[in-house]
Amino acid sequence: MDVSVTGRHCHISDDFRTHVIDRMTSIEKLSEKVIRVEVQVSAYGNKRQPEESARVEITLRGKGPVVRAEAQAQEKLAAFEQALDRLRSQLRKAADRKKVHRGNHAPKSLREATALLPEQFSMNGSSPEEESDTHTVAGIQVTGDGPLVVREKEHRTEPMTLERALDEMELVGHDFFLFVDAASGKPSVVYRRKAYDYGVIRLDLSDAVVPTA
């Protein structure tokens, strides 16, 4: 397993690099598919929030889905240990979920645990008086100061099964995961409810009207 340790706005000492490499060897016991580990350390020097002046992001790359965890602390060593704990927790949860799905315990089946929510959500347009001060933020027409989009991401993906979407959600440590359902071709979101219960929302585009420019 290859371990890469890089610094952003900070110096990485040989002692810190050695410590990281030694600690990451324990990950091999939890996931044998890991080929490369990327550890990025960033320093911000935030005087107002010194407890978040160092951030560590750990990324596992291999034959399976990408696994990522991050943490912030006053010192980079503490941030690394917190990120490593979160990474272990995510890997254990993903492994436990697979055991549950295979029937090693006695929870509800995956079909029972997931709930399709067909309710449609609509947004009412603003009145003509409110549209006088409009502008575009990340492709959204907004009035006044909001909504404020502070981050925008675009990811390449491919249609996947619900089972794989659940695995990837657990491995990245999120409470939801956006994907395209391979069975239906619908944009879908799977989200965590409690324990090993999950919900899924699918968008039906069959009657959608694409606006023309």
Image (cartoon, rainbow, N blue to C red):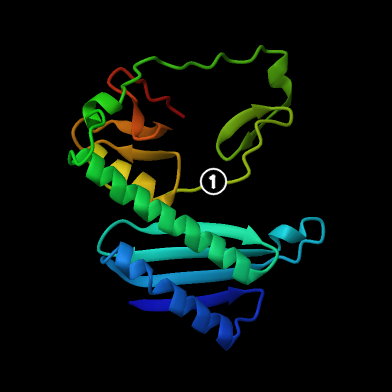
Residue appearing at x 55%, y 65% in the figure:
81
Q: Among all residues in the image, which is located at the extreme front?
A: 105
> Position of 51 compared to 80: left or right?
right
Number of numbered discs overlaid on the protein picture? 1
> Position of 123 compared to 46: left or right?
left
**Residue 106, position in %: x, y?**
23, 33
Q: Is residue 57 visible?
A: yes
**Residue 133, position in %: x, y?**
73, 25
Query: Residue 202 lies in what quarter of the image?
Result: top left
Check disc 1: other Cα within 10 Å, few if <14, some if 14-19, many if 20+. few
**Residue carrying label 1:** 152
Residue appearing at x 58%, y 15% in the figure:
125
**Residue 114, position in %: x, y?**
30, 27
Query: Residue 72 lies in what quarter of the image?
Result: bottom right
* Residue type (three-letter) at the residue carrying disc 1: Glu
Q: Is residue 160 visible?
A: no
Residue appearing at x 27%, y 21% in the figure:
206
- Residue nearer the viewer, 103 or 140: 103
**Residue 68, position in %: x, y?**
44, 58
